[in-house]
Amino acid sequence: MSKSRKIIAGFLCLALTFGITGCDQSGSSPKPPSTSETEEDYTVDIGDITLDIEENKNIEGAVVNYIGTYNPTKAGDVKPAYTYFTETYKATLEVDLYADSEIMEKLAVLINGGESPDLVDQRDNSFPYYIGKNTYMALDEYMDMSAPQWKEVTEYIERFSIGGKHYYYPVFYYVSPRVLIYNRGKFVELGISDPKELYDKNEWTWDTFYSCMDQFVSKTKAEVPDAIGVYGSMATAFMDSTGTPLIDLKDDQLINNLNNSDIDRAQSFLENLKKQELSKLEYGSGYNNVAHEPVILGYAAFHSMGDWKITDYSKKQSKDPDMDIMFVPFPRDPNADKYYMGLNTFAYLVPAGAKDVEASCVFINCVRMTKTDPELMKKVDESIMKEKKYTEEQYELWKYLQTVSNFDPENLVYDFAYHIDEQTCNDVIIKFCENIPFVTDEETSTWTAMRTSLAPILENSITSINGDLKK
């Protein structure tokens, strides 16, 4: 058996053993575009749009086999690109959908059986963990980073290179991928400063965030005894706001920052919120951490959630003219030298053994152009507003945060905490990034105790992954 075949077989074994998937349990990493509660099917007219990409590619008749958790032929963010792809290149996508928990196991079976799909959406740990397992193909000979659609994000693509090769070309960029959603109407009623106005004035900090929550709870406690300041996980966002990610990637190696003082300060801040009963992972009984009712009903000041959740609120709001829901990025660390924000990305990857790499890369280029070509961007705006029901104000901020050129790259922090093996992610990262400051068991009831208890497991995992990345 060749070395690459052994690695793929090992990947299959891992997938079948652990049911490997992206390890985020509560939406801290971005979901694929438009993965809201429903997907609407409607026509997109691309008219006479001509994109500045290689239209002379002869891929007519190509059928790109895609496996993923959502349908890119219907998703509002992607459908205009798919329409352009089919009408210009006379190619199409064959879509096979699977549950999030099934994707990597299915991919492993297909690769091992010599039936690799052509395209798959990313999982949390696609990069760099599965790059080290030879699960995906390098695309350097098929992609041109000097092309218009990639010019402004070249620096970020380079961040995701391994051994000088580029497997991962992010098409979507999410600045502050986790946001704080709030009922602005309730804030106005209670006389609490509007977080969006604070953000616009550069006054949105850990301190003002705390003040908003403290006021909300104090003013609603008599009417709502279990009122809280915030629910949902948020540790990654706070760590990133210090400018230091929990796990970094430098020179093709993961860097463990667990003992960094910035990490300790962020986690201590969150631990204090718990002690003051301002935060919970889930709001009370009957509501999980993705439920939107607590904010709408005025039981909680903020819902910490991935930005994909906003559309569920906006669809509710579209049916109720009295509802006023807004969101803001995570607050600035008052002790940091800059307003650091987390950055996440979304991409399609080409699995090892794919039959039609060229057509897959053409599709990736078309999708990226939805963020750079003015005419196609207009079509995307129309498509998203039709599907997601954002207000103009919500969409303006959402779009601003997804335009990476609006930000200084030095202010954007990419955290690789969720990009490691599934077992360690479940045993360690979720506890560090989602359970703090919510744990109640005696052994790890404090941040310090949890860090001491789990540090060796994390270090062993990183050492193992770094070994794979050197091969």
Image (cartoon, helix red, strand yellow):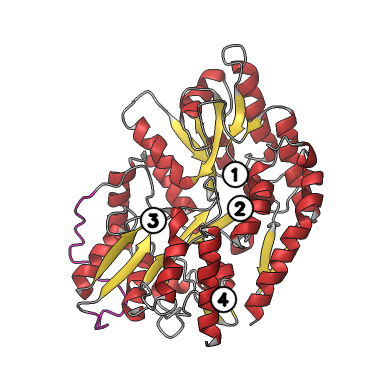
Residue position marked by numbered label 4 in the rendering: 161
Q: Residues within 10 Å of mark 3 (few under 14, many from 20)?
A: many
SS assignment at label 4: strand
Q: Amino acid at mark 2?
A: Met
Q: In the rendered structure, find residue 345 and report the number of the disc placed on it.
A: none
Q: Residues within 10 Å of mark 4 (few under 14, many from 20)?
A: some
Residue position marked by numbered label 2 in the rendering: 341
Nearer to me, 161 or 324: 161
Question: Which residue is depicted at the point 53% across and 71% down?
Answer: 11
Residue position marked by numbered label 1 in the rendering: 330
SS assignment at label 3: loop
The C terminus is located in which quarter?
A: bottom right
Question: Which residue is depicted at the point 27% across and 64% down?
Answer: 82
**Magenta segment includes 292:** no
Q: In the rendered structure, find residue 69 and report the number of the disc placed on it.
A: 3
Could you tell which of marks 3 and 1 lies nearer the N-terminus? Answer: 3
Q: Is residue 137 above or below residue 445?
A: below
Highlighted range, magenta:
41-59
Q: Main secondary structure of the magenta part?
A: loop
Tell whether label 3 touches label 2 (CB within 8 Å).
no
| Residue 64 rendering spot, x and y as whole percentages | 29, 72
Q: Is residue 339 visible?
A: no
Could you tell which of marks 4 and 1 lies nearer the N-terminus? Answer: 4
| Residue 335 rendering spot, x and y as whole percentages | 76, 47
Q: Residue furthest bottom?
A: 2
User: In this rendering, which labeled residue sits more in front, label 3 or label 1?
Assistant: 3
User: In this rendering, which labeled residue sits more in front, label 3 or label 4?
Assistant: 3
Tell whether label 1 touches label 2 (CB within 8 Å).
yes
